[in-house]
Structure formats: structure tokens, C-alpha cells
Amino acid sequence: MKDSDVIVLEEPKLSLTDQFYLPQVLVGLGTTMKHMFNVVVRGKDRVVQYPEEKREGLPVEKGGLLLRTYRGVHRLNKDEEGRVKCVACFMCSTACPASCIHIEAAESPWPDREKYPAKFDIDELRCIYCGMCEEACPVDAIELTHLYDIIGLTRQEMIFDKTKLLEIFDQTVKEEPM
Ligand code: SF4
Ligand code: SF4
């Protein structure tokens, strides 16, 4: 390396006011006072006791503000007869990089398919919401919805079983048709 390539950095010189730090302290206090005014006087920006209490006008409720590409919690889709569409082929669980889908296949009670999922669990805490399961499914049985505020007070509650995943279908199908 040549000497001319070396860049020598010099410490910036502080002015007299900078050396006292007082202006920056006052700026910080001003920000604190502004937030206090908003909370105490205007009732804005206060802490919300989530999940018991939620802010109004969240993007999902407002509709359309969330990006259409947003990937939230899963649903298991139903067919026109209200049956689970899944045929228990295990493509989604094989594709899942987080190994968070657990399926138990059983003989189908319906003549149009061989198998159906007797058990279908997704660990929503392990999931990384990559969408690979949705991509892998040959019958469009699993989908990620735009629901993002999923709440559970225990780890067990965050393992969504077949019933819950089908309920999410009922809950979201009007807003997010297949
Ligand atoms: S979104 Fe990704 S990590 Fe989550 S269950 Fe599907 S494949 Fe697995
Ligand atoms: S959800 Fe789709 S990919 Fe997963 S087991 Fe069912 S049919 Fe196969």
C-alpha cells in the first residue's frame, strides 16, 4: 500500500456548546416532554395492555393496508362439500425447513381420495413463515393468511391442530378467498 492511499482521520473539534452537552440534553428532555404531553393531555400514544386490549385500526381490520404478500398464520382449506382438502401426501412437511408440520395420515372416509389427515399440527412458534408448505401443496390445501396477531399464553396453545386450522379457514375465507 502506498502512503498516498492511507487516509488519516482527525477527531472533529467540538464547539463550546458541544463541550457542555447542554443543548443535546435539552433536546432529549424536549422529546420526553412531548411524549408526556401526548399521553397525559391528549391521551395518545399510551401503552396498550396487549393482548387483552388492542389498538383500533390495525392494518388487518382496516383491510388493504397490509401488503398482499404478507405471510401470517396458516389455514387448512376446505372443498365445496366442507371437507378438508388435504390428501395427506406429506409434501408440505417434507418441504418445511423448520420441521414444524406434523401429519398423521389415515384411510380416507371418502371415495374420491385414498388418504386424509387424521392429525395435522403446525407449531406456529417454530414456523418461519417462508411459505414453502403452500408452494409444495399439490391440491392448494394449505395457505398462509394475513392474520398476524396470533396469541397464546403457553407453547402448547401455539401448536395449531386441524380443528383450529380449519376454523381459521372459516374466519378468513370471506376476506381472503381461495
Ligand atoms: S411457512 Fe415455512 S416454516 Fe412455516 S410451516 Fe410452512 S414451510 Fe414450514
Ligand atoms: S396440506 Fe397439501 S402438501 Fe400438506 S399433506 Fe396436505 S395435501 Fe399434502
Image: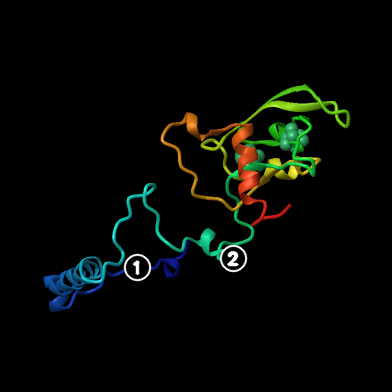
Q: Is residue 91 visible?
A: no
| Above or below, comparing residue 14 to residue 123 in the picture | below
Circle number at residue 64: 2
Tell me residue 78's x, y (percent): 73, 41
If you read the primary sequence from the N terminus, does the residue marked by circle 1 or circle 2 appear first?
A: 1
User: Quarter for ligand 1?
Assistant: top right
Tell me residue 23's x, y (percent): 16, 75
Label 1: which secondary element? loop
Going by the numbered disc 2, the residue's amino acid type is: Gly
**77 horizontally vs 110: left or right:** left
Label 2: which secondary element? loop
Residue at 59%, 62% in the rendered image: 67
Spatial distance from mark 1 to mark 2, Cα to Cα?
Answer: 52 Å
| Disc 1 packing (10 Å; few <14; some 14–19; many ≥20) | few
- Decide which of 126, 11 is in the foreground and name it: 126
Q: Nearer the viewer, mark 1 or mark 2?
A: 2
Residue at 30%, 56% in the rendered image: 47
Residue at 62%, 38% in the rendered image: 165
Circle number at residue 8: 1
- Decide which of 159, 136 is in the foreground and name it: 159
| Disc 2 packing (10 Å; few <14; some 14–19; many ≥20) | few
Going by the numbered disc 1, the residue's amino acid type is: Val
Tell me residue 6's x, y (percent): 41, 66
- Decide which of 127, 153 is in the foreground and name it: 153
Tell me residue 174's x, y (percent): 66, 55
Q: Is residue 106 visible?
A: yes
